[in-house]
Amino acid sequence: MVNGLHTDETVGPLFMTPDVDRNREFFRRKPRALTDKRTTVQDAVSRLVSDGDYIGIGGFGTNRIPTAILHEIIRQGKKGLGLSGHTATHDFQILAAGGAIDRVDVAYVIGLEARGLSRAARRLFEEARIQVCEWTNAALAWRYRAAAMGIPFIPARIMFGSDTMRYSAAKTVTCPFTGQKLLALPALSPDLAVIHVHRCDKYGNAQIDGISVSDADLARASKKVIITTEEIVPEEVIRQDPARTIIPAFCVDAVVEVKYGSYPGNMPYAYFSDEEHLREWLSADSKPETLEPFLRKYIFGTKDFSEYLELCGGEAKMERLRRIEFLEEV
């Protein structure tokens, strides 16, 4: 809004080029052979995450968060990362607390939905330590779709008349058929996507139970893909019901089996979110002097996700969360 009036001019930074021909050159060289991609969290992050990378994260809100990878990113001290804040909650909180990100395409960040706001995340914005470009949830989802389709932008009729549009990097275009005004949403091809799924074979063919949100497009749009999975299953299991395979192997660069890998988030039809631990996170990140010892205890002081899980209650906690998910306990 300028002087109380909305304009069609946009002023947001464009963090990733929508040059799909350049992306096609990358994908043309990407191997498509069915190779065994199983590895560890430590190796996947060390090999596939570089300082300065732009990352897209799968799932929705606190559902299907790839927590183990996010912990390892800050444990290994990765810096200068960009993030697509499509439906980000605890994932953004982790990266913000670890000082890993310096730019973000915003649709939904800072809030952990009804649980409250992350102060560590909010401080990034209040102290101007992060570059920001604004979008809606749909706009970011359709930007993935454009990249997955191999087109430089996708037309839409959203955000008009709003400051969200003004602070985005979209452009106004005219439809060549009707003359109508449309908004061109630039293709978004992250350097890396990190997605947690219910099951996957060793090649990377991945299945998700319940809503898949934008993960199919995110996987196809991204140059590299890390899949963490509740379990690695034989290829025959995947082939028994191929229609459920949301992400095909040719998109995937690494497969990591991480049981309970969405904790403390929810894994639909498997376990509920740990609301007590999420409250502990929110309390700890309210100020730097409490956040630092919290991170030291739970992330920097643990060697991996399994040690973190044990600190939080281990199998006993996960069994309780399983019962809550299946409404056996309230």
Image (cartoon, rainbow, N blue to C red):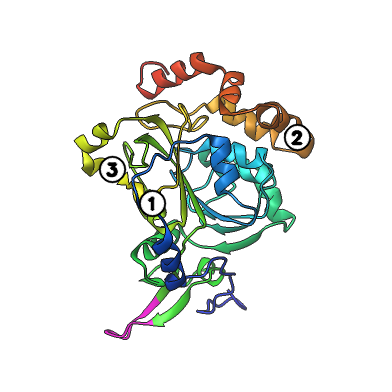
**Which residues are the magenta region?**
174-182
What percent of the width, then of the height, locates residue 64?
44, 37
Disc 1: which residue: 251
- Label 3 environment density (alpha carbons within 10 Å; few <14, some 14–19, many ≥20): some
The three-letter amino acid code for the residue at tag 2 is: Glu
The three-letter amino acid code for the residue at tag 1 is: Cys
Q: Earlier in the sequence, mark 3 or mark 2?
A: 3
What percent of the width, then of the height, locates residue 93?
61, 42
Under circle 3, the secondary element is strand
- Label 1 environment density (alpha carbons within 10 Å; few <14, some 14–19, many ≥20): many
Spatial separation of the CA atoms under disc 3 and disc 2: 40 Å
Q: Which mark is residue 29?
A: none
Disc 2: which residue: 292
Instruction: Identify the residue at image location x=40%, y=54%.
Output: 31
What percent of the width, then of the height, locates residue 3?
62, 78
Q: Is residue 176 magenta?
A: yes
Looking at the rendered image, the quarter that the N terminus falls into is bottom right
In the visual, does 213 lie left or right of 86? Answer: left
Under circle 1, the secondary element is helix
